[in-house]
Amino acid sequence: MPKTILILSNHYITIYAFRRELVARLCAAGHRVYISSPYDERNRYFEDLGCTMIDTPMSRRGMNPAEDLKLVGQYKKMMQELKPDIIFSYTIKPNIYGTMASNALGLKQVCNVTGTGATFLKETALSKLVRLLYKVSVRKCYKVFFQNTGDKDYFVRHGMVKDNWALLPGSGVNLQENSLAELPDTGEIRFLFAGRAMAVKGMDEYLECARVIRELLPNTCFYIAGFVEEEKYQKRIADYEALGVVKYLGFQDDMKPLLRKCHCLILPSLGGEGVPNVLLEAAATGRACIASNINGSVDVVEDGVTGYIFEKGNARDLIDKVERFLCLSYEEKRQMGLRGRDKVVREFDREIVIARYMKEIEE
């Protein structure tokens, strides 16, 4: 029987990049799908699938009490009009403020904790406030999906959820789109950082690693692909690029050609990830990954098997792991990537995630 499904998101890309296959499956099954997110000119993609888009302005960063109360009111009005059978939400504000509205109306909402960002990395007034907001909202919702056990344990330990949680293998990876690609057989070994240039993403450690390795081994290349989110990195990256330490590529709409061109992906994040999609996509392509020992990354990368794990915030340890990778033969690098592909096929296929959501609808 067709259901009315409401999806709450803070940005078009949150749904398109990681959940468009789920949305397509819902529409194909005849369900009435509504997507609430801030306006984006690319929304036509989902409208063509048969979805109804609902423009819902919100700030993705910071907390403004007046604006946030307004968002709760918008969600409540939306839910009263649509009377959804089930609500799916992603990221912090749709999760918290969506469940404030859905709990008040007695509706079923499934939240997805896609990562905690920098919120809980340090004990601050903001982290205390966010914990309180989770307790009065998400703790009482129908179900909470976590992408890694570390985040789940943190939420349980602080009473932010009760027994209403379940685990998912991240957002999963589309194995057809991210197909296996042969490792480049070149003299130059290429590394890739893909993400926003921010301290919390480990940009300092990556730049230091690139500087040291390039001095030792000039036949290496260190790419940076992504927006420069924090201004302090604008000049630093430009200076390093002028010195030949890194190559800055800017934001890439499609990472697949770049992943195929590289030999190894580096994710030096300090924490707050769910299950990093860039690790899943790199591994699916057959590339070894070097990642910090944080929640989510350690679920994807098997140390010494599919890549290497290093101590977060420790540039020297990252350099050691990069040197270890460089010492491998071509065939050893290739086999490491193939083992990574095998792991994501077994454990992180996006079809696994879609099946879990379809089951929630059926039940």
Image: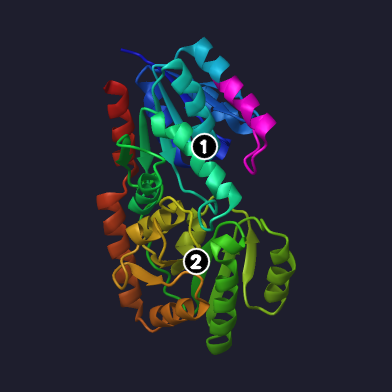
Residue 81 lies, in percent from the top left, at 53, 10
> Which residue is label 2 attached to?
268
**Mark closer to the chain start, 1 or 2:** 1
Element at label 1: helix
Residue 286 lies, in percent from the top left, at 36, 62
Residue drawn 35% across and 50% down?
153
Quarter placement of the N terminus = top left
In this view, the mark in front (1 or 2): 1
> Which residue is label 1 attached to?
133
**238 above or below 49?**
below
Q: How many numbered discs?
A: 2
Residue drawn 75% across and 68% down?
235
- Would residue 175 appear left or right of 40 to someone viewing this image? left
Question: What separation in Å lies between label 1 and label 2 (alpha carbons)?
Answer: 29 Å
Chain part drawn in magenta? 58-75
Residue 347 lies, in percent from the top left, at 27, 50
